[in-house]
């Protein structure tokens, strides 16, 4: 019988709040990526988690079978949805904060 995989998460930002979430989730979830709009942060790593542009999130969700997109503000979610291909439907669940992960 196979081991159950950890839920896969993308953190939709990279400020202090997201870093705290990264640390909180590291034992129970696989944090696949964090998101930044700042060119000087793109492709860098925080605690070995790579930072991506909002336009890359839709592809990441499919490639890594992401379960949850965690955002802190509506603006973070909007930036990702605006950058997605036209008509894109995210299979991952959107969660406002990590508290929403406990309910899943």
Image (spheres, rainbow, N blue to C red):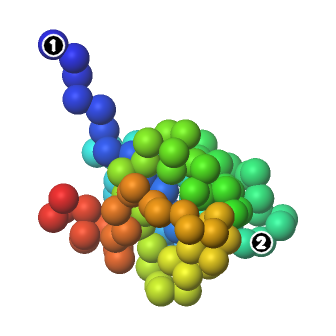
As drawn, the residue found furthest toward the right would be 40
Q: Could you say which is closer to the camera, residue 62 or residue 33?
A: 62
Image location (x, y in percent) of residue 53:
70, 63
Mark 1 vs mark 2: give the one in front: 1
Give the residue number, with chain letter if any, for mark 1.
1
Q: Which residue is mark 2?
A: 38
x, y percent for residue 75: 55, 86
Where is residue 67 drawn, in percent x and y?
36, 51
- Above or below, 32 relative to 99: above
Q: Residue at x 23, y 29 (%)?
A: 4
Please identify the quadrant where the C terminus is shown.
bottom left
Quarter occupied by residue 101: bottom left
Of labels 1 and 2, earlier in sequence is 1
Closer to the camera in the image, 102 or 91: 91
**Position of 29 relative to 83 (above/below):** above
Q: Does residue 28 appear in this view?
A: yes
Furthest residue toward top:
1
- Which residue is at the front of the view, 32 or 57? 57
Q: Residue at x 75, y 51 (%)?
A: 43
Helix or strand or loop: what does disc 1 sit on? loop
């Amino acid at each position: 019988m196979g081991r159950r995989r950890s839920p896969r998460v993308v953190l939709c930002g990279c400020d202090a709040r997201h870093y705290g979430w990264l640390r909180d989730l590291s034992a129970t979830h696989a944090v696949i990526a964090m998101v930044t709009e700042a060119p000087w942060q793109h492709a860098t790593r925080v605690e070995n988690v790579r930072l991506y542009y909002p336009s890359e999130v839709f592809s990441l969700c499919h490639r890594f079978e992401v379960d949850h997109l965690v955002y802190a503000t509506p603006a973070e979610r909007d930036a990702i949805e605006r950058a997605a291909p036209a008509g894109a439907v995210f299979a991952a669940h959107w969660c406002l904060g990590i508290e929403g992960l406990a309910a899943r």
